[in-house]
């Protein structure tokens, strides 16, 4: 449940908030760990003990056994995963509890269960491996673990798909159809081996022949940020900056990924910018906060948004402010931590631990 920030926090200056956050960190010492996703505001990033993508931060959360208090500056599904991977003595707090994920909401548990029931006619448990993207609620992660599958992120989707197809004939991948499609093509699957399950249609809108022929069944879902990038954006940059390298996130539509020079997770994009020679021109197709930070961190390189002034922002990542973080660190004992109860926790943990193992 969201807490309303007291007036003193809403009206505090950034300097005052910075002092309060710094003082709280010093007071809590090793008991505190602040995890910050790459898409967070620049001013929040400044206070990160660890920064990364959802995969990297999951690994850190799993290993932070000494930290009793984990402040996760991200979105709800990330904090849930951190809670599942942490110990009983640890508590995970989401500084802004309203920070959700529209893509995760596209895979409702009831719809997934209905789809799985329909797929039983095709030998679901024996022939189809569920693979859930990290961008899902804990219930869907638990479903995945219960039926033998694992969680993936954009960092390890290749390895996850290979793992699934080594063990079963088909993979049921949700909820991002673009990441699933781009990964399947990279794996070497042909278009007729890739189908999309539309949860709004009877039997996913697929014929029995399509399901039998498919090697990967994708859920009809997408990231509202990354689907904003278009082929026209790529073509415009090619004309205006022919020397530019175009790097995009694999949640972008397949045609954009195909035309880009490179694609990968947020951590991949960060490393790409770090390793590019001085003087490089790089157009990036991902959330604007990361792009702006890369431009600031590498002033010797011309780094800009692939879609120009229309580059999208993830409104949910943008919700978390210094005000939220300061309030959380000073009042964590009065706040309700993110908690995933049993048996959901144990089932989801199976799938998350497999994710860590394959990478």
Image (cartoon, rainbow, N blue to C red):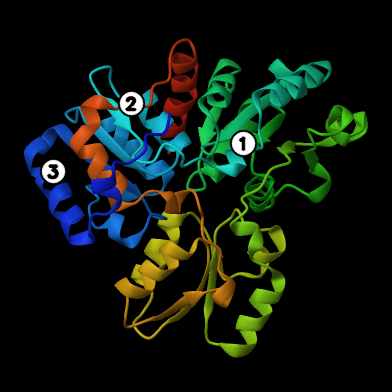
Q: Are marks 3 and 2 in contact (CB under 8 Å)?
A: no
Q: How many marks?
A: 3
Q: Is residue 91 left or right of residue 201?
A: left
Q: Which mark is residue 105?
A: 1
1 and 2 marks in contact (CB < 8 Å): no
Disc on the earlier residue, 1 or 2: 1
Q: Nearer the viewer, residue 352 or 330?
A: 330
Nearer to the camera, 94 or 216? 94
Residue 25 image label? 3
Q: Quadrant of residue 62?
A: top left
- Of callouts 1 and 3, which one flags the residue occurring earlier in the amino acid sequence? 3
* Residue 32 against residue 351 in the figure, above or below: below
User: Which secondary structure, mark 2?
Assistant: loop
- Which mark is drawn over residue 337? 2
For residue 342, which quarter of the picture?
top left
Residue under the image location 43 percent in, 58 percent down: 268
Q: Is residue 104 visible?
A: yes
Count neighbours of disc 3 (C-alpha within 10 A) and say few if under 14, some if 14 to 19, many if 20 or more. many
> Can residue 64 be seen?
no
Q: Nearer the viewer, residue 275 or 296?
A: 296
In the picture, measured across the screen, residue 4 lies left or right of residue 63, that is right
Decide: is 249 above or below 100: below
Secondary structure at numbered mark 3? helix
| Residue name at image x 78 percent, y 41 percent | 196
Q: Quadrant of residue 266?
A: bottom left
In the picture, measured across the screen, residue 337 lies left or right of residue 119, that is left
* Residue 334: % across, % down: 25, 26
Q: Quadrant of the N terminus?
A: top left
**For residue 287, above or below residue 6:** below
Residue 39: horizontal and vertical position, in percent?
42, 55
Residue occupying the point 61% across, 69% down: 260
Query: Residue 305 location in percent, x, y?
Result: 51, 73
């Amino acid at each position: 449940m969201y807490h309303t920030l007291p007036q003193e926090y809403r009206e505090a200056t950034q300097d005052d908030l910075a002092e309060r956050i710094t003082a709280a960190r010093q007071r809590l010492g090793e008991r505190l760990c602040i995890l910050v996703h790459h898409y967070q505001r620049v001013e929040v990033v400044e206070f990160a003990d660890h920064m990364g993508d959802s995969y990297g931060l999951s690994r850190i959360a799993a290993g932070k056994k000494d930290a009793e208090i984990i402040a996760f500056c991200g979105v709800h599904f990330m904090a849930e995963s951190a809670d599942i991977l942490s110990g009983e003595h640890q508590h995970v707090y989401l500084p802004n509890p309203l920070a959700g994920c529209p893509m995760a909401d596209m895979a409702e548990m009831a719809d997934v269960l209905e789809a799985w029931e329909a797929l039983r006619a095709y030998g679901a448990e024996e022939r189809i491996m569920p693979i859930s993207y990290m961008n899902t609620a804990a219930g869907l992660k638990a479903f995945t673990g219960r039926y033998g599958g694992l969680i993936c992120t954009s960092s390890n989707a290749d390895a996850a798909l290979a793992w699934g197809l080594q063990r079963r004939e088909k993979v049921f991948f949700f909820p991002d159809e673009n990441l699933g499609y781009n990964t399947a093509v990279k794996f070497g699957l042909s278009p007729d081996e890739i189908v999309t399950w539309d949860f709004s249609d009877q039997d996913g809108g697929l014929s029995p022949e399509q399901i039998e022929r498919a090697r990967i069944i994708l859920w009809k879902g997408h990231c509202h940020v990354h689907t904003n990038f278009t082929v026209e954006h790529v073509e415009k940059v090619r004309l205006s900056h022919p020397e530019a390298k175009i790097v995009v996130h694999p949640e972008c539509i397949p045609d954009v990924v195909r035309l880009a020079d490179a694609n990968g997770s947020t951590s991949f994009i960060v490393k790409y910018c770090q390793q590019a020679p001085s003087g490089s021109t790089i157009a990036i197709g991902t959330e604007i906060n990361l792009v702006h930070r890369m431009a600031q961190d590498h002033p010797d390189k011309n780094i800009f948004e692939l879609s120009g002034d229309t580059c999208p922002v993830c409104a949910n990542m943008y919700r978390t402010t210094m005000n939220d973080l300061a309030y959380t660190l000073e009042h964590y004992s009065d706040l309700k931590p993110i908690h995933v109860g049993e048996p959901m926790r144990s089932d989801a943990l199976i799938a998350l631990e497999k994710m860590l193992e394959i990478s």
